[in-house]
Amino acid sequence: MSETGGVMDLDVRLLRHFVAAAEELHFTRAAARVCLTQQALSRDIARLEMALGKPLFARSTRRVSLTSDGELLLRLARPLLAHHDEVVGQLRSSSRFVVDVVGEFTTAARLLATARRDEDDFEFYARETPGLAISLAQLRDHHIDAAFCCLPDTFTLPAGVEHRRFHTEPLGLLVPRGHPLARRRTIPMSVLPGLEICCHAGNHVTGEWDRFAAELLAKWGAVPVADHPVVRGAQDLAHHVRPGEPPVLVPVGQPEIPGTVLRPLAGTEDGYPWGVVWRTGTQHAGLDALHRAIDEV
């Protein structure tokens, strides 16, 4: 906050955090929405209230509600933030297009490489984030322009976001050479009940994938291994997939990993539900190029 010539300048970041809290009326949910801790969000709200000299929330042990000043600020802040985001977006979008591709060597990364092939008027930039919640926050704040993601039919997207579900990528099991399943060309679903399977390894792993894979393993009667840190990158994955370790559930587009073989699952239509999301109203040659790459590949 600062004052210039008697006019107070509001911190846009604090306003954004206020709107999240005002719409959720639940500080824990609002903090998750803007990728903060609850304590950090509470500090930001307190800073805004101190700068304005007015309480914006009425708090009790049971509920949070807006004061009359809070309701007024919410009405005024929404169009202000929308106009701010539009200005920033238009200035940024003319010469670059930033895309979240989930991880290196994923299907999304290959699609971006295809889209880049014939574009000379602007530059594509790739980002890799660990989940759709972060991607949506960055999309809203104009830090990225589009995001590939694991997008199951059951996932509900927020207002202001458009999407395209474009591919169900078949799944397979990554096993060490010499594993009994490595001798098969494909793996029938009949061997999965009771089989321990890891779903926390690979560049495609996100929070959405974790939930999606857990539902699949339960549906198939397979047993998820105990939680452990996510494994990314070919070198770490090669170390993880070794004799004595359980098979790893991966999309069949997983790149080759030294010392392992990938065997597709046969007899199921379940697969990695690829999608792409972008801000409503986005008009940019980069988005058009992504759609063409999807259609082509």
Image (tube, grey):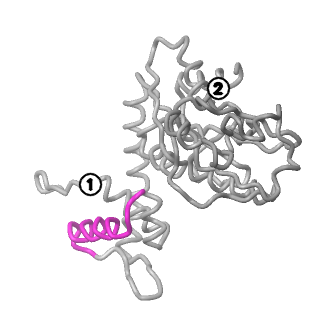
Q: Quadrant of residue 196?
A: bottom right
Q: Quadrant of residue 169?
A: top right
- Give the x, y percent position of residue 121: 45, 13
> Is 52 on the left-hand or right-hand side of 153?
left
Q: Nearer the viewer, residue 259 or 100?
A: 259
**Residue at the spot of label 1:** 11
Quadrant of image for the C terminus? top right
> How many discs mark residues in the rendered view?
2
- Give the x, y percent position of residue 144: 45, 37
Mark 2 residue element: helix
> Is 151 on the left-hand or right-hand side of 115?
right
Residue pictured at 43% horizontal, 52% vertical? 79
Please name the amino acid that badge 1 sits on. Answer: Asp
295 is higher (above) or lower (below) than 8: above
Can residue 160 be found in the magenta stretch?
Answer: no
Q: Nearer the viewer, residue 269 or 29?
A: 269
Q: Is residue 108 visible?
A: no
**Residue at the spot of label 2:** 291
Quadrant of image for the N terminus? bottom left
Q: Which residues are magenta?
A: 35-54
Please name the amino acid that badge 2 sits on. Answer: His
